[in-house]
């Protein structure tokens, strides 16, 4: 597993990380035993970045990670959590007092004195652009509550605003074959500024797993059922904002372009991780098989296993499918 610099922190994180929204909520039920097995399988395969948030299962995801890592001293994992969705996402709620309360709660959940990395959880643009936001975050660093901070964003414009701030460690943004706009400005700007990029929703909520059909259904408590049109939160968080049927057709075309023995999710993760400026890709996993498969995608980057996978050839197909079928379907802000 390739390890890459985490911005200016002096830390390194794995090219393939682990997103843990699904260990908290909104993806159907995941037992504590399954959650621990996913974390263990990922760590065993060189994954050194766990991404979570204080609202994933109202802290369940953080607590599971905290207990898991406490039993493994010297684990080498960087835990990136997020804050800002415990109250309505309105600018007046992003105060130093709330920042302190949110980070204190995450420190308790994770069982640590200092959070490795805390990210604002897709706040309003006004918060990202406010000087007061970064003054409050800098105070948390000075007090030792957090070691570093970043911003998770919805739009490229928000990403560029965050990247321009001198103490921002990372920006987390949706980036996958269905969402190519970050390639144009965000990745080059982040690379130039020494800001890490975490690519989230890399498999478009499973559309790029190659396992779904028009007959696939999801549990009632799965956001892929209740948020397809943005009913609960930003639509871009579910299937990257692409209509399910459109995504199915695009995924089938991408899969057909791959050599025998190379799965679409592995190719997708390797392709994302190969883009200059991407630090880590953070797919989720609900079971050990998915965790192992995600981590194994790093082998395609290294040319392991005798695979005929050609990332440049796949890149050409990705761009062709996007330009022809997806560009017009994506909201222009994304």
Image: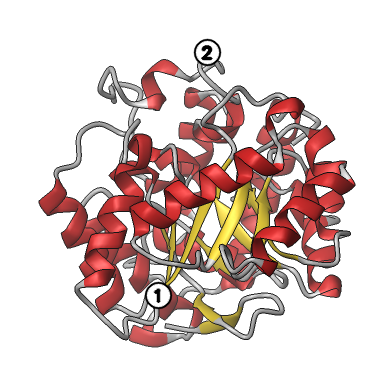
The alpha-carbon separation of the residues under discs 2 and 1 comes to 35 Å
Q: Is residue 52 something that shows in the picture?
A: no
**Residue 19: percent from the left, percent from the top?**
42, 54
Q: Nearer the viewer, residue 212 or 36?
A: 36
Q: Which residue is mark 1?
A: 77
- Few, some or many C-alpha atoms within 10 Å of disc 2 (few <14, some 14-19, many ≥20)? few
Q: Disc 2 on helix, strand or loop?
A: loop
Name which residue lies at 51% across and 77% down: 13
Name which residue lies at 44% across and 51% down: 106
Q: Which residue is mark 2?
A: 231
Q: Is residue 206 something that shows in the picture?
A: yes
- Whether residue 69 sits left or right of residue 302 in the image: it is left
Does 165 appear above or below 136? Answer: below
Label 1 near label 2: C-beta < 8 Å? no
**Residue 288: percent from the left, percent from the top?**
19, 59
- Whether residue 313 sits left or right of residue 332 in the image: it is left
- The answer to which of marks 2 and 1 sits earlier in the sequence is 1
Does 107 appear above or below 278? Answer: above
**Residue 158: percent from the left, percent from the top?**
80, 43
Q: Nearer the viewer, residue 288 or 80?
A: 80
Label drawn at residue 95: none
Foreground disc of the pair 2, 1: 1
Q: Disc 1 on helix, strand or loop?
A: loop
Q: Quadrant of residue 165?
A: bottom right
Q: Nearer the viewer, residue 290 or 66?
A: 66
Name which residue lies at 35% across and 23% down: 214
**Residue 212: percent from the left, percent from the top?**
33, 35
- Quadrant the N terminus occupies: bottom left
- Whether residue 140 sits left or right of residue 194 in the image: it is left
- Quadrant the C terminus occupies: top right
């Amino acid at each position: 597993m390739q390890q890459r610099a985490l911005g200016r922190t002096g830390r390194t994180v794995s090219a393939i990380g682990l997103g843990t929204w699904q260990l908290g909520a909104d993806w159907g039920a995941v037992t504590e035993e399954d959650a621990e097995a996913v974390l263990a399988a990922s760590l065993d395969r060189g994954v050194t970045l766990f991404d979570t948030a204080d609202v994933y299962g109202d802290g369940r995801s953080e607590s599971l990670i905290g207990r898991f890592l406490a039993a493994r001293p010297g684990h080498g994992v960087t835990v990136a959590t997020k804050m800002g969705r415990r109250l309505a996402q309105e600018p007046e709620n992003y105060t130093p007092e709330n920042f302190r309360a949110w980070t204190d709660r995450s420190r308790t959940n994770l069982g640590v004195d200092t959070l490795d990395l805390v990210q604002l959880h897709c706040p309003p643009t006004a918060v990202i652009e406010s000087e007061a936001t970064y003054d409050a975050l800098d105070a948390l660093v000075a007090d030792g509550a957090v070691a570093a901070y970043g911003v998770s964003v919805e739009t490229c414009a928000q990403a560029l605003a965050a990247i321009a701030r001198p103490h921002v460690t990372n920006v987390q943004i949706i980036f996958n074959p269905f969402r190519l706009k970050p390639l144009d400005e965000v990745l080059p700007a982040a690379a130039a500024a020494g800001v890490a990029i975490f690519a989230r929703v890399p498999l478009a909520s499973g559309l790029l797993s190659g396992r779904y059909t028009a007959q696939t259904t999801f549990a009632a408590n799965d956001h892929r059922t209740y948020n397809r049109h943005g009913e609960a939160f930003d639509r871009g968080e579910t299937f990257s904002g692409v209509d399910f049927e459109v995504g199915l057709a695009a995924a089938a075309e991408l899969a057909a372009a791959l050599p025998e023995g190379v799965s679409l999710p592995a190719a997708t993760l390797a392709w994302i991780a190969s883009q200059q400026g991407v630090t880590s890709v953070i797919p989720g996993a609900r079971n050990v098989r998915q965790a192992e498969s995600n981590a194994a995608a790093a082998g395609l980057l290294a040319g392991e296993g005798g695979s005929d996978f050609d990332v440049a050839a796949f890149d050409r197909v990705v761009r062709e499918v996007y330009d022809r079928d997806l560009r017009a379907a994506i909201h222009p802000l994304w």
